[in-house]
Amino acid sequence: MVKNTVHILIILVAAHLMTGCNDKKGPNDKAQFVISDSLMKTLKIDSVGKCPIVNSLTLTGKVGFDEDKVARIYPMVSGIISGVRLQIGDYVQKGQVMGVIRSSEMAGYSSDLVSAKANLLIARKNMD
């Protein structure tokens, strides 16, 4: 109904503008407007009425996030996550602990570090 009313309003405004451009008209002349047959077939004339104003629209879509403001974080070692200290959408700062990973790979690195320290100590004693 609103769409049809808009079409009628546009046609009436156009008719008014067309009749107002003629300066040769006298005060008693009546303006005539002719609508073509093809336009008349698509036109629907309706009366103006009051209706409530709708302040909301129902739309379909998908809500997402800005890819430019997302940082992908990948762990440097493999393992099992045993604790997450953040939730989706939380802001993080540099150095903040985000989670705890139990990794057999890291356990191997730790034992290699202990062995390397022991070997360094032995090498220093032998050097002395």
Image: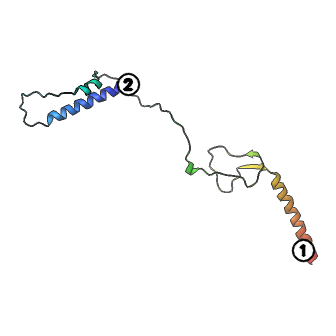
Q: What element carries label 1?
A: helix
* Left or right of 61, for residue 36: left
Q: In this view, does 36 lie above or below 64?
A: above
Q: Is residue 64 above or below residue 107?
A: above
**Cα distance in 3D space between marks 1 and 2:** 90 Å
Residue drawn at (28%, 24%), measured in percent from left and top?
41
Residue drawn at (68%, 46%), measured in percent from left and top?
86
- x and y percentages locating residue 123 in the rendered image: 91, 73
On the image, which quarter does residue 40 sit in?
top left
- Of the residues under marks 1 and 2, which one precedes in the sequence? 2
On the image, which quarter does residue 89 sit in?
top right
Taking depth in this image into account, of 127 and 14 the one nearest to the observer is: 14
- x and y percentages locating residue 42 in the rendered image: 29, 25
Q: Name the residue under label 1.
A: 124
Q: In this view, does 113 lie above or below 90?
A: below
Taking depth in this image into account, of 122 and 74 the one nearest to the observer is: 74
Residue type, label 1: Arg
Residue type, label 2: Pro
Q: Quadrant of the C terminus?
A: bottom right
Q: Name the residue under label 2.
A: 52
Residue drawn at (56%, 44%), measured in percent from left and top?
65
